[in-house]
Image (tube, rainbow, N blue to C red):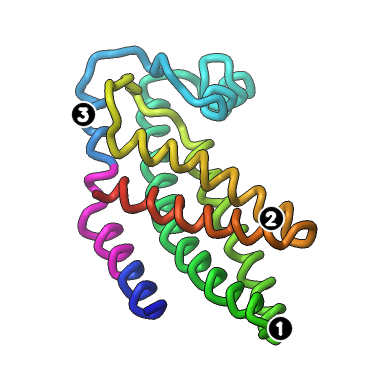
Amino acid sequence: MIRFLIFFILLLSLSSTFSQEEDMFSSLRSEAEIDTSLLPDRMIFTQRLLWGEKGLMRKMRISPLTIEQRESELKIRRKMLKIHQVIGYTTLVGMLAQGFIGSQLYNGNYKLYETHKLIGNLTSISYFTGAGLSLFSPPPLVNKKTKGLNSIKAHKYLASIHFSAMVTTNFLAKKNKKIHRIAAYTAIGSFATAIIVFKF
């Protein structure tokens, strides 16, 4: 069952990355056609910190706020979000492997401890790298507030859950095994759901 699930996720990853990646970025094309200011009114704090009108990239004159530079930033954003998507699928495979190995440890198979630790470290690196790519990517041209729940909002809400769960999982790895396990399964469930809702 686990092998089938991993195969299905990899298949979904490949089809998403190569044949349907346009869905994720179709909003960027429509944004470019709208006559608007160079920065959106709404940005997450990490984007404002780096890319805002008074952000570090502007103050350090690495990325001046011009039309040409914003076009370049949107290309950077697209690349960062593509990589974020691929890393997301890789991370999910690592999480599923961790869930399986972790359950073996709880059943008394301690020979897998070093494997669990290694895959856990690699999955954490993968997860937080993917999160960083999303959080620190340049902002879109437009960030409209929409009413009701949609796939992007659901993806963001679930991101808050799995991010908190991942921090808890890592922090309590040796301090509280019971909560560590609950947090790990919460991270896997919410992360997988975030990928599914964004895809469909």
Q: Is residue 23 magenta?
A: yes
**Crowding near the residue tagged with mark 3, few <14, some 14–19, many ≥20 C-alpha atoms within 10 Å:** few
The correct choice, above or below, for 102 with respect to 56 in the image is below
3D distance between C-alphas at marks 3 and 2: 40 Å
Residue drawn at x 46%, y 32% is 138
SS class, disc 2: helix
Find residue 30 and name its label.
Answer: 3
Q: Quadrant of the N terminus?
A: bottom left
Q: Closer to the camera: disc 1 or disc 3?
A: 1
**Crowding near the residue tagged with mark 2, few <14, some 14–19, many ≥20 C-alpha atoms within 10 Å:** some
Region rendered in magenta = 11-24
Kind of residue indicated by mark 2: Asn
- Residue pointed to by mark 2: 170
Q: Is residue 160 magenta?
A: no
- Residue pointed to by mark 1: 110
Q: Main secondary structure of the magenta part?
A: helix
Q: Earlier in the sequence, mark 3 or mark 2?
A: 3
**Crowding near the residue tagged with mark 1, few <14, some 14–19, many ≥20 C-alpha atoms within 10 Å:** some
Residue 43 drawn at (x, y percent)? 46, 22
